[in-house]
Image: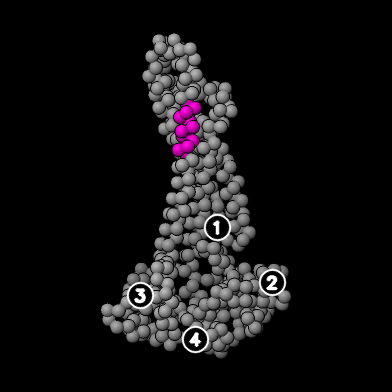
Amino acid sequence: MTLSIEIRESARIALSAIRANKLRSGLTTLGVVIGILTATLVGTLLNGMTDAFERSVSSLGADVINIGRFPWASFDDYRTYRNRREITFQQFRELERQITTAAAIAPQCEDFGQSVGYERRRAKGVWLVGNTEVALSIRGLTVERGRWITASDVSSERAVCVLGSYLSEAFFPNDNPLGKRIRIKDTPYEVVGVLAPMGNMMGWNQDNQVVIPVSRFQGDFGRRPDYTITIKARRPDRVDETLNEVRSLFRRIRKIEPGRMDDFALNQQEAILAFFSGFKTTLASFGFFVTGLSLFVGGIGIMNIMFVSVAERTKEIGIRKALGAKRRTILIQFLLEAATITLIAGIIGIGLAWPISWKIGDIARESGSIFEARMSWAIVAFALFVSGTTGVIAGFIPAWRASRMNPVDALRSEN
């Protein structure tokens, strides 16, 4: 027989053997089902997290530099960072006057725990941001309704604000928010704009924010706020040049002596991406460890059941070999049987993971997240490949043993 005919015949015999022992084959697949389910969900969630995170972080801009007291992705020496000198508005003005490689520069004040209300509705833990007119382009924001803060708003300290989409929906679900007055703490602010949805970033709802003129922030929420300075490089391909100029100028403005370390942090998009990459690697390692453990247990079960199958069909093997079946034919038969069992387990695992991933995505969207958990064809193909490979590896030793049987000894067997 040709190899293709041998494979078709072996597949038919393998399927007949599985149908004859449905319960045993089903119980054997549990470990593989759990492994494939875990691997598929981990891959799906990682893809969804990566896509959502990159979309969120992209708003920071690869050409934007942020000066602050705290580094974004380092938590090794919090006390040192906390004790650093505050960044002042005067330092911002001095940097704005001297810098030559920036397309735009703006101060920013933040408070992550403000209380905002409208009539009887109230939101707590709101991200309050003090910005200027140029911050819109630096932060990469889009105004969906109304307008952004103007230079006149900042200079005249007008009590106006721009709402994040989450607060706009919470306070004005069936009404136009423009022209309405909300209360931040006890101060009324007129709503002049609404931002386009930004989604969550690492569990932080970026749409739960209110933007006010930086001059109002200083007057209403702290005479000496701790500023962050945001800088957009003039040329995206020369961000390093801007970074070096900013460091040099700001050290001089802060009067840091040569040889001493910076007492400020220069943060960029890459810092958050690097931090997320480490987090993703940790999550993937844990998920695939569980997957590997489940597949190992499942593989042991497949190997045991194949040894039992070989022992039960010793006479059948002897008859086939006596009639001229080659060793490879017997080998292929039992390898296909093991691979078929694990492929069925893989299909079951994928079938379970598919509705679970959809449900996770639906829950995420209902909570306002841009996270998408959708299974890709690449993940399905990978899961099927892993399940089939597990069957081939686990079934090889029993199949090899069957193929090496002496036909005379096999026919004498009492099994």
| Residue pointed to by mark 2 | 172
Between disc 1 and disc 3, whose residue precedes?
3
Secondary structure, mark 3, is: helix
Whole-percent x and y of residue 260?
A: 30, 79
Q: Amino acid at mark 4?
A: Arg
**In-front residue for pair 177/167:** 167
Task: Give me the disc on residue 242.
Answer: 3
Q: Amino acid at mark 2?
A: Phe
Spatial CA distance of label 2 from label 4 is 33 Å
Q: Say which amino acid is labelled 1.
A: Phe
Q: Is residue 403 shown left or right of residue 206?
A: left
Classed neighbour count for the residue bearing mark 1: other residues with Cα under 10 Å, few (<14), some (14–19), many (≥20): many
User: Which residue is located at x 42 percent, y 72 percent?
Assistant: 78
Q: Quadrant of residue 410?
A: top left
- Element carrying mark 2: loop
Residue bearing mark 4:
224
Q: Is residue 64 visible?
A: no
Colour theme: one colour
Asked if residue 127 shows in the view, the reply is yes
- Residue 125 on the magenta segment: no
Q: Nearer the viewer, residue 98 or 83?
A: 83
Residue 6 screen position, x and y as percent: 44, 20
Q: Are marks 1 and 4 in contact (CB under 8 Å)?
A: no
The residue beneath circle 1 is: 371
300 within the magenta span: yes
Tell which tag, 1 or 4, sits nearer the viewer. 4
Residue stretch in magenta: 295-306
